[in-house]
Image (spheres, helix red, strand yellow):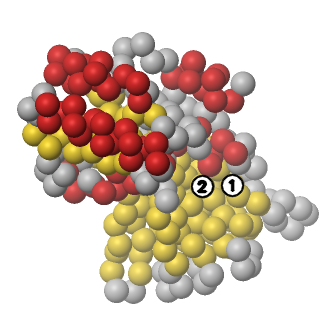
């Protein structure tokens, strides 16, 4: 068993990472930052997102488990005072996995297609002007959108930015993704559906526009600005992220604790 520790720079996280490293070495566990079997994140959900992108090239063989020292902890099951229990758990109970899907994002530019992935969500945002998008779902032209942009999220990402936009919360094991409007124009001239759309995993959302000038394309904490693209396709990826989960953690209890 080879373990990597991925932590944020908060003082409490640095202290926990140092303590965990010492305990793992005492237990003669191999520490491998480049090719681990298990990544232990120390922080909050933002740290988990960064770790997933950091180890994107080996997601098919690496598993994640989180220690919570941040603000929100949907992906982190353990507390800093449970390090000994965590090490025992990893030695004896690391076969209980939860897999969460990613988004596959294809950006069409003159020089070719750029491929990206997102764990929580991807967005198209235009803070400079009204963004026009022709929205096609699974080959069917659906609507002509005008507004700030759209957010497309995974089931696990449905409790993040998507929820703040009024989107639905989707149970993580459901094979679906969601599109939610951001600042849509609805009047006598322009009209959109105005509701979040929950979409089957095998469908593709296509977003086309005569101009993406000024638009920012985000994926989780990362972002790019593309002025010369003409189309973006988004679907649920066949690739997923594996988490070693505690059996006593309830998704709905976590939703209740964080929002009610």
The quarter of the picture where the N terminus appears is top left
Badge 2 marks a residue whose secondary structure is strand
Instruction: Give the residue displayed 22% in from the left and 31% down from the top.
Output: 23
- Which residue occupies the extreme right position in the image? 188
> Where does residue 134 sit, x and y in percent of width and height?
61, 67
Instruction: Give the residue displayed 60% in from the left and 33% down from the top.
Output: 169
Number of residue marks: 2
Badge 1 marks a residue whose secondary structure is strand
In this picture, residue 76 sits left or right of residue 142: left
In the rendered structure, find residue 229 and report the number of the disc placed on it: none
The quarter of the picture where the C terminus appears is top right
> Where does residue 205 sit, x and y in percent of width and height?
50, 56
Name the residue carrying label 1: 181
- Which residue occupies the extreme top position in the image? 248
Q: Are marks 2 and 1 in contact (CB under 8 Å)?
A: yes
Of residues 6 and 249, which is closer to you in this image?
A: 6
Q: Check the image and report above or below for 100 versus 92.
A: below
Instruction: Give the residue displayed 49% in from the left and 74% down from the top.
Output: 224
Separation of residues labelled 2 and 1 (CA atoms): 6 Å
- Ranked by sequence position, the earlier of labels 2 and 1 is 2
In the rendered structure, find residue 151 and report the number of the disc placed on it: 2
Q: Check the image and report above or below for 88 versus 103.
A: above
In this picture, residue 34 sits left or right of residue 173: left
Q: Check the image and report above or below for 240 versus 10.
A: above
> How busy is the neighbourhood of tag 1: few (under 14 within 10 Å), some, or many (20 plus)?
many
């Amino acid at each position: 068993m080879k373990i990597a520790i991925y932590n944020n720079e908060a003082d409490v996280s640095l202290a926990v990472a140092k303590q965990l490293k010492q305990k793992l070495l005492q237990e003669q566990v191999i520490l491998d930052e480049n090719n681990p079997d298990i990544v232990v994140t120390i922080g909050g959900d933002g740290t988990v997102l960064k770790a997933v992108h950091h180890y994107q090239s080996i997601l098919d063989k690496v598993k994640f488990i989180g220690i919570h020292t941040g603000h929100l902890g949907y992906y982190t099951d353990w507390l800093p005072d449970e390090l000994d229990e965590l090490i025992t758990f990893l030695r004896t109970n690391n076969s209980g996995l939860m897999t969460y899907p990613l988004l596959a994002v294809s950006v069409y530019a003159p020089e070719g297609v750029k491929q990206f992935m997102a764990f929580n969500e991807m967005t198209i945002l235009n803070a400079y002007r009204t963004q026009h998008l022709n929205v096609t779902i699974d080959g069917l032209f659906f609507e002509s959108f005008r507004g700030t942009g759209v957010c497309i999220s995974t089931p696990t990402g449905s409790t993040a930015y998507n929820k703040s936009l009024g989107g639905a919360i989707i149970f993580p094991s459901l094979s679906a993704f969601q599109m939610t409007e951001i600042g849509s124009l609805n009047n006598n001239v322009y009209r959109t559906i105005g509701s979040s759309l929950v979409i089957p995993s095998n469908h593709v959302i296509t977003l086309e526009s005569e101009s993406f000038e000024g638009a920012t394309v985000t994926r989780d904490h990362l972002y790019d600005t593309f002025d010369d693209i003409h189309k973006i396709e988004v679907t649920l990826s066949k690739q997923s992220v594996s988490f070693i989960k505690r059996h006593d953690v309830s998704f709905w209890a976590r939703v209740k604790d964080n929002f009610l």
